[in-house]
Image: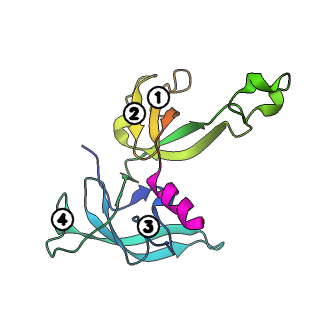
Amino acid sequence: MVPFSRELYIEEDDFMEEPPRKYKRLSPGKEVRLRSSYVIKCTDVVKDETGKVKELHCTYDPQTRDAAPADGRKVEGVIHWVSARHALSAEVRLYDRLFKVAEPAAIGEDIAGNLNPSSLETLTGCFVEPGLADITPESRYQFERLGYFCADIKDCRSPHKLVFNRVVPLRDSWAKVAGQEKK
């Protein structure tokens, strides 16, 4: 069971205030389905003093829990979420290629000069489902649209310190579409 509450967290990438064509995630006035849950519609965007989106106000259709809208309207896009009240804080480590070149041995002596400075990105302040509170180090999970992750063997010792290392990323279909539109 995944808890549901009045306040939810969604991925930052799952909302755009002014979306391009073919964007199938949340935007003002648009409906999307929350994975394994309801259809929601964004009705208001609240920003902080710098103009950054702070929160979204949405309505939900109570008749759509795991069902299509009764009136036949089409809802494109499904986003994942976690209950804000039940979420657990986690650190997530995203690994990329260690070297900037495909064959570091072929470049000769300057291997250190070809190290990728962005080979590790550490994300703090992430939130995960409460079902991950009792995990054991080295247990593996798929985080939707992000990839496969392993609980860190050294740093993940309690529900108060959850650390996940990405083992394999997944392709992001939206990134591909957005990249084509830029061309």
Tell me the residue that label 2 is attached to: 141
Tell me the residue that label 4 is attached to: 68
Residue sitting at x 64%, y 34%: 97
* Amino acid beneath label 1: Cys
CB atoms of marks 3 and 4 within 8 Å: no
Q: Quadrant of residue 144?
A: top left
Instruction: Of the two numbered discs 3 and 2 on the same chain, state the one appearing first in sequence.
Output: 3
Which of 155 and 103 lies nearest the eye of the viewer? 103
Residue sitting at x 16%, y 61%: 67
Label 4 element class: loop
Label 1 element class: strand
In the image, the segment drawn in magenta is 172-182
Residue 154 forms part of the magenta stretch: no
Tell me the residue that label 1 is attached to: 150
Residue 120 position, x and y percent, is 65, 36
Q: Residues within 10 Å of mark 1 (few under 14, many from 20)?
A: many
Q: What is the C-alpha distance between the residues marked 2 and 1?
A: 6 Å
Q: What is the C-alpha distance between the residues marked 1 and 4?
A: 35 Å
* Amino acid beneath label 2: Tyr
Instruction: Of the two numbered discs 2 and 4 on the same chain, state the one appearing first in sequence.
Output: 4
Tell me the residue that label 3 is attached to: 23
Q: Is residue 178 above or below residue 148?
A: below
Point out the residue furthest to the front here: 106
Label 2 element class: strand
